[in-house]
Amino acid sequence: MTTAVVTGLGITAPNGLGTEDYWKATLAGESGLGPVTRFDAGQYPSRIAGEVSDYVAEDHIPSRLMPQTDHMTRLALTAADWALADAGIDTTDMPEYGIGVVTAASGGAVEFGQRELQNLWSKGKEYVSAYQSFAWFYAVNTGQISIRHKLRGPSGVLLTEQAGGIDSLGHARRHIRKGFPAVISGGIDAAICPWGWVPQIASGLMSTVNDPARAYLPFSEEAGGYVPGEGGAILLVEDAESARTRGAATVYGEIAGYAATLDPAPGTGRPPGLRRAAENALADAGITAGDIDVVFADAAGVPDLDRAEAQTLTALFGAHGVPVTAPKTMTGRLLAGGAALDVATALLALRDGVVPPTANVGAADPGHTIDLVTEAREANLRHALVLARGHGGFNAALVVRR
Amino acid sequence: MRRVAITGLGVVAPGGVGVKEYWNLLTAGRTATRRISFYDPSPFRSQVAAECDFDALAAGLSHQEIRRLDRAAQFAVVSTREAIADSGLDLSALDPGRVGTAVGSAVGCTTSLEREYAVVSDGGRKWNVDHEYAVPELYRHFVPSSIAAEVGLAAGAEGPAAVVSTGCTSGLDSLGHAVELIREGTTDIMIAGATEAPISPITSACFDAIHATTPRNDTPESSCRPFDRTRSGLVLGEGAAILVLEELESARRRGAHIYAEIAGFASRCNAYHMTGLKPEGLEMAEAIDAALAEARLAPDTLDYINAHGSGTKMNDRHETGAFKRSLGDHAYRTPVSSIKSMIGHSLGAIGSLEIAACALAMEHGILPPTANLHEPDPELDLDYIPLVAREKKTDAVLSVGSGFGGFQSAMVLARPERSTS
Amino acid sequence: MSTTTATVTLADLTRMLRESAGEEEGIDLDGDVIDTPFMELGYDSLALLQVIGQIQREYGIEIPDDAVVDAETPGALLALINSGRATAA
């Protein structure tokens, strides 16, 4: 069967703008979490976020696109530019309908949407932007990336909350298998504005610890919620044969296995679906748990969810059976961007033979029988398993192979 | 190759809840567009919509579901239950891991979000909105993926689940997504379709701002006029259609009623403009060609086209061009209609509602008409089935969609026992 | 409704175009653009709708729907606005 490989990465993350800055910071355990600066969060119980700093939109986005794009879409366009440049692909050399775009989204371009809601409700309908009809909606990143690079292949947008980054890549692989040579995929999200903040507070899962070093401590005894972040990763997924033919400079790795599940209804007594997703992804990759060299965990930071994930890992790999890491401790949870960034990070780990650390968590809760990597660890890595869960019961697992 | 059959239908649409009411409306050529009643439409340029008279309790939802679910999710859950009952499947007897969910929606839980926004912002006065006034359901509304989770919950499905959100092609693309999952062997059954409840002031305002919706407010019942010389824009609608899709051989083995096979699907992007279309319809034609190729059907085997037919000047010209490009002379012999003339444009939901209509058209041998088509646009010269439903046996039908973001999708339904080219 | 006495100048219009729709690379809006079609200046109908919205708000006038189709150049749009066809909102 056709092999889908990743040949380009574009990363915008709170602890690094661009792949190499991000990777350097991540290996050094440098966190991008800090007090919210994008709005005055003083009145809210949660005041820490992972913001993409040093991003000057005007340096990356044409003037004509500025009034019609949210911060989220600007980051996505920038990451897509970088992924294509990294892959060294000339899109005009590809078949006319050969490149598709599939991205994940969660709450849309929230800040843009909030501004237009405020215009409507405080001033009147004449004040609502002509761009509102598409600038806030869930498909906007896919649409704008397609237009910017004249990509006329199949388009897609998948919503599974935090699992979406993986689902978009799994779906990109479907297109590759159907014969499209390349698909731009992944997820970039940004919702650090009051109207993006308050729903997350209402979820009851956000951390209310307002020390950046103590706010998001997945698998720790002190775990008490998550910190939101913005950014994510856009990846160029390519047919291996096509990549070889055009002489792609870098092949980061193969998308070897993918699966998704939904949790059973509460009260059925059936187990959560994360383990099934992982098992199905391993089977899809044609490997067993013993072949996995590192796991990038979902790392919810919420005690019950951490326990469920640690139990799943123990059941799959045995107690302390595989290195487990959560570099998202340095970025916060990026909604639809998080799992895509984890996949990109896993590919970089395979490339360099090093497991990036879980920051700020000194040691896992002894109740979790997992080998949590808290300092960068060199290792010969061939297969990485990336796990993600989305609010409402979504589970996704993806295996990358060097 | 594994093939995919439609074995169950569930619908909530303007004019009635349930498949029977829906089909009655469409075949009678009756329109469900009216002056907006959900809020005072008088400040808006366009004041008409096709609203559902939807009584959530009467439709079978529990009090807790009604509290928990946005209107779009309510439509989806009610339609899911009808579709599963219609399919005759006992899902509890099957491996839930082999049953997946794919639900299209362009704007998610927008109605609930705007309602709650008005509260937490105190009518738009506060940029720093008040978390103390946030309802516990707010996060579910914030992430419309919750709709797919609720459909999965209602079906007891534990396979892959997702909301597919590609603007106005969401309802075709979610079904296309579901077909792929069955074909590749990931699932055997998909609960798939789409839902939308967009009729809310912010939607009115943003469509007003780009003159997409019709300003014809004096005759609401005939305000949506696809292919007519006097057409002046789309009319918002709402609703849901959920389908049960099954691997064809297992559906046959259990003796299921099969409406049709989803034989081909393709989507392309014009990569041209977030809202604009080029008149030639190249990318839509490419999607039609690819969907026909996947179905292994020649263009001249098509018996009916369910058009996007939104009733904007630009769209109707665009897709007429695409039909001619893909079908050649056969385009002039193929009846085409737009049911948006009757039920409005329910954005992400409409693609699935149109596929449900296509399945019913094949089932009953009746083609729904284009209502309000009194004065054909001389530039648009196909057979658009004006005003009155038409009896015709169909073996292969096409449905297309076109949406913001430049997305163009095409789906082909056919009788499973057809011969292929 | 009364006709408006507001006068919108080319400089006002280019300022609002920049704010509402940005500026196409390689186009000098401060040059001689009065008779250059909006399309050649890099502005599509969406950009025009956005800028017309801004003009209506800033000047308190109502510009007819067909302006976006009929006024193909800055000069034509200004003529339409300043001719009195626009009405006080």
Image (cartoon, grey):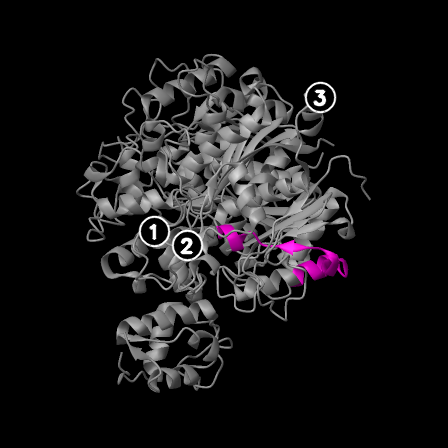
**A215 or B343: nearer the viewer:** B343
- Horizontal and vertical percent position of residue B285: 67, 57
Q: For mark 2, give the secondary structure.
A: strand
- Start-end of magenta stretch: B321-345
Give the residue at x 36% y 54%: B36
Circle 3 Cα neighbour tier, 10 Å, few/some/many (<14 / 14–19 / ≥20): few
Q: Quadrant of residue B415?
A: top right
- Give amino acid for label 2: Arg
Secondary structure at badge 1 equals loop
Q: What secondary structure is the magenta-colored segment mainly? A: helix
Label 3 SS: helix
Give coordinates of residue B357: x percent, y percent: 59, 44
The reply to whether callout 2 and callout 1 are in contact (CB within 8 Å) is yes
What is the CA distance from the residue labelled 2 to the residue labelled 1? Answer: 8 Å
Q: Amino acid at mark 3?
A: Arg
Q: In the drawing, what numbered circle is on residue B253?
A: 3
Which residue position holds label 1? B37
Estimate the spatial distance between the alpha carbons at disc 1 and disc 3, rounded to whole Å: 48 Å
Identify the disc placed on residue B34: 2
Residue B337 falls within the magenta-colored stretch: yes
The amino acid marked with disc number 1 is Ser
